[in-house]
Amino acid sequence: MKGTNIRPLVIVGAGAAGLFLAALSAKLGHCPLLLERGPQVGRKLRLTGGGRGNLTHVGDSSELLPHYRPDPRFLWSLYAAWPPDRVRRALLDFGIPTHVEADGRVFPDSQSAAAVAERLGQIVTEHGGQILYGSCVSALEPDHNGWRLELEHGGSISAAKLVLATGGAGYPQTGSDGLGLDFLNKLGLPTRPFSPALVRLLWHERRTRQAAAGLAGLSLRDSGLALDRQNRTRGELLFTHTGLSGPCALNLSGRLDPNGSRLSLDLIPGEALAATISWLKAAASGAGERQLLTTLGERWPRRLLEALPVISPDWARFSRELPRRTRSLESSQIENLAALLHRLTLEPLHPAPLKEAMVSAGGLSPAALDPRSCAVRAIPGLHVIGELIDLDGDTGGYNLQFAFATAGAVADALAGQ
Ligand SMILES: Cc1cc2nc3c(=O)[nH]c(=O)nc-3n(C[C@H](O)[C@H](O)[C@H](O)COP(=O)(O)OP(=O)(O)OC[C@H]3O[C@@H](n4cnc5c(N)ncnc54)[C@H](O)[C@@H]3O)c2cc1C
């Protein structure tokens, strides 16, 4: 193996993307060689969906694309060829039936991401492919045969066609530590450094972390968070000992400045401002001796209301002017209070480090790739798939959908040769 014979197809990285491509191409008779630095296939895949594997998310392209950043245009033709339904059909063909759960997330019927990884690995070897474990590619360069790969522990491999599927740089203990980006940089391709996405947020100031620690465990089922007009999310928000988590915070994390960003929190994103004003007016007219905190407590946990001055400078300022009794609210105060409940500026937050991130932003610019084949336009015989490409998705199966679809695009190109 480690010698001069030329392998027709070498895939570097047996994560979700590399494994799916190896299975598809093995079935097509392309005898892929899958090189994996670790001891097993799909180490990150096994962790997905809390171990259950949220494999994709149903929807058409216009529904899916808003869930990706920074520029999802690449996905129009990719997802026209590989929509979630086709990913599911391919999985079924591999003996991995799936089902759709609440809000469109797709899971394997086995409820086991590890079983999915094992099954894909089996398909590869059953159909004439080969997986080499403990094989870390340390360098690569084009040569007269196609590609020459150097392995960290010695030896080299020649490949006619090379696919890089080395992943991003989050959760490096699963094998993806960002090495693939060095290869792309040395080849002179346009890349962006990896940075954390889908990661919890931390209060930037120590004093806020200390003062807000008591909110840990509190969950708001439907909240909105916004960085600016373009970058806003909605969904469940969780308070942790040190900051915010839950889909609403995770999906925005990749846009935050590591030196701290100010977000605004909407406590009632599903309600129009006019409806909030009406609710407060009604409460003020019939409240008797009721305290304002008790009125607000009908809708939000007391623990949150008491901590608002700590996490929101707006609230800290405004609440000093508010009366204790609800019926003492003046109409201008009602309007300001309603507006604030929809737009509370928070103390600065920053994303947790890359090593904790479920997904990383950054990687190869999609503009360098043909979306129908994930072939690098400028370098014949090279394809790049999965998280190594600079497109990251929300939680909910969007990242595995992307990994599988990019793998599918390479398989289509191989089938059409
Ligand atoms: C805890 C957690 C939960 C997640 N849950 C979900 C979810 O439910 N749904 C979802 O859509 N996404 C989820 N994700 C994200 C998803 O797992 C990734 O986006 C996806 O695995 C990326 O696939 P990939 O093949 O591009 O990279 P990876 O899966 O990271 O695979 C890359 C592989 O390349 C190997 N490798 C790297 N460098 C080399 C080298 N030089 N030589 C040889 N091998 C190398 C690595 O060992 C690794 O096996 C989750 C991520 C985490 C961490």
Image (cartoon, helix red, strand yellow):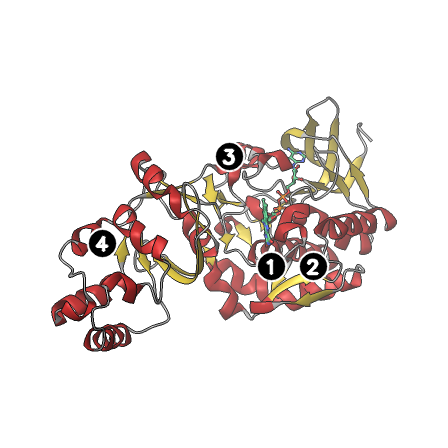
The residues tagged by marks 4 and 2 sit, at their Cα atoms, a distance apart of 55 Å
Label 3 and label 2: CA atoms lie apart by 27 Å
Task: Point out which mark residue 315 bears.
Answer: 4
* Mark 1 and mark 2 residues within 8 Å of each other at the beta carbon: yes
The amino acid on which the numbered mark 4 sits, given as a three-letter code, is Trp
Q: Earlier in the sequence, mark 3 or mark 1?
A: 3
Q: Earlier in the sequence, mark 3 or mark 2?
A: 3
On screen, residue 98 versus residue 394, left or right, reads right
Label 4 or label 2, whichever comes before in sequence order: 4
Crowd band around label 2 with a 10 angstrom C-alpha radius: few (<14), some (14–19), many (20+): some
Q: Amino acid at mark 1?
A: Arg
Q: Which mark is residue 328?
A: none
At x 25%, y 49%, the residue is: 309
Name the image quarter holding the C terminus: bottom right
Which residue in the protein does label 2 denote? 412
Q: Position of residue 185 (x, y in %)?
A: 51, 34
